[in-house]
Image (cartoon, rainbow, N blue to C red):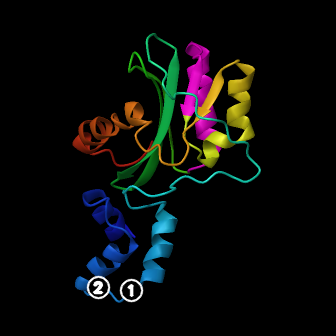
Amino acid sequence: MEMIDEQYTKAPFYGVRWMTAWLRALGYEVNVKRVRKLFGGLGLQAIYSSKRRNFSSPAHKLYPYLLEGVKVERVNQIWGVDITYIRLAHGFAYLIVTKGYYSRYVVSWELSNTLDSRFCTKALREALWTSRPEIFNTDQGMQFTSQDFTGLLQRSETRISMDGRGRVYNNIFVEGLWPTVKDEGVYFHEYQTVA
């Protein structure tokens, strides 16, 4: 698992089949089924455009995409949120960031070693404590479609917008932060653990 995690950091485009071939070339007797199980245990997924990467629970309500044709003109007009995986020397972490589309300011962030909705809800509470956007844009991942998450937005009278299929560039305002955070923040300083 450590070797997969390390190689994934070097080549995040490696999917299960490429990783299996890489491990076999090193002399390990593994098959695609085993590597797929290890990917799942590490929470890894190859980075590439796919038809659908985020899955929401069938019990969760999905909201329409509200940003079509909207011009970003002022602070707190639109906020966006995204989660990224960060490999550490002794483990891994998930980082969620809420960011203003106009100011490009990080409104809140939170780290977790599990990919559940609790740390997402905690980051949202912190963000809403500072201010309130008119529109809050997310993808359709189960962390963002949960009743806890959407309920906070509804109580703050914030309009909820969710990216649909084929909208891979909508969250670029938030995703553009990841190379800086990972390369200059985490990997340069060689952080060992989340704590």
Q: Is 8 in the magenta?
A: no
Q: Secondary structure at mark 1?
A: loop
Percent coordinates x, y for residue 20 in the rendering: 34, 79
Q: Residue furthest right?
A: 59
Name the residue: 55% across, 36% down: 138
Read off the magenta span.
115-137
Name the residue: 43% across, 22% down: 101
Name the residue: 64% across, 29% down: 160
On screen, residue 160 above or below 38: above
Name the residue: 66% across, 20% down: 158
- Say whether disc 2 or disc 1 marks the residue closer to the N-terminus: 2
Q: Residue furthest top?
A: 74
In the figure, residue 27 lies in which quadrant?
Answer: bottom left
Q: Are marks 2 and 1 in contact (CB under 8 Å)?
A: yes
On screen, residue 168 above or below 176: below
Question: Is disc 1 surrounded by few (<14), some (14 to 19) or many (20+) residues within 10 Å?
Answer: few
Question: Is disc 2 surrounded by few (<14), some (14 to 19) or many (20+) residues within 10 Å?
Answer: few
Mark 1 lies on residue: 30
Q: Secondary structure at mark 2?
A: helix
- Tell whether 25 sits left or right of 79: left
Percent coordinates x, y for residue 21 in the rendering: 29, 81
Q: Main secondary structure of the magenta part?
A: helix
Nearer to us in this view, 187 or 70: 70
In the figure, residue 147 lies in which quadrant?
Answer: top right
Nearer to us in this view, 82 or 130: 82
Image quarter in which the N terminus is found: bottom left
Q: Amino acid at mark 2?
A: Arg
Say the numbered circle drawn on residue 24.
2
Percent coordinates x, y for residue 87 in the rendering: 36, 53
Nearer to us in this view, 134 or 183: 134
How far is the residue under mark 2 from the one under mark 1?
Answer: 7 Å
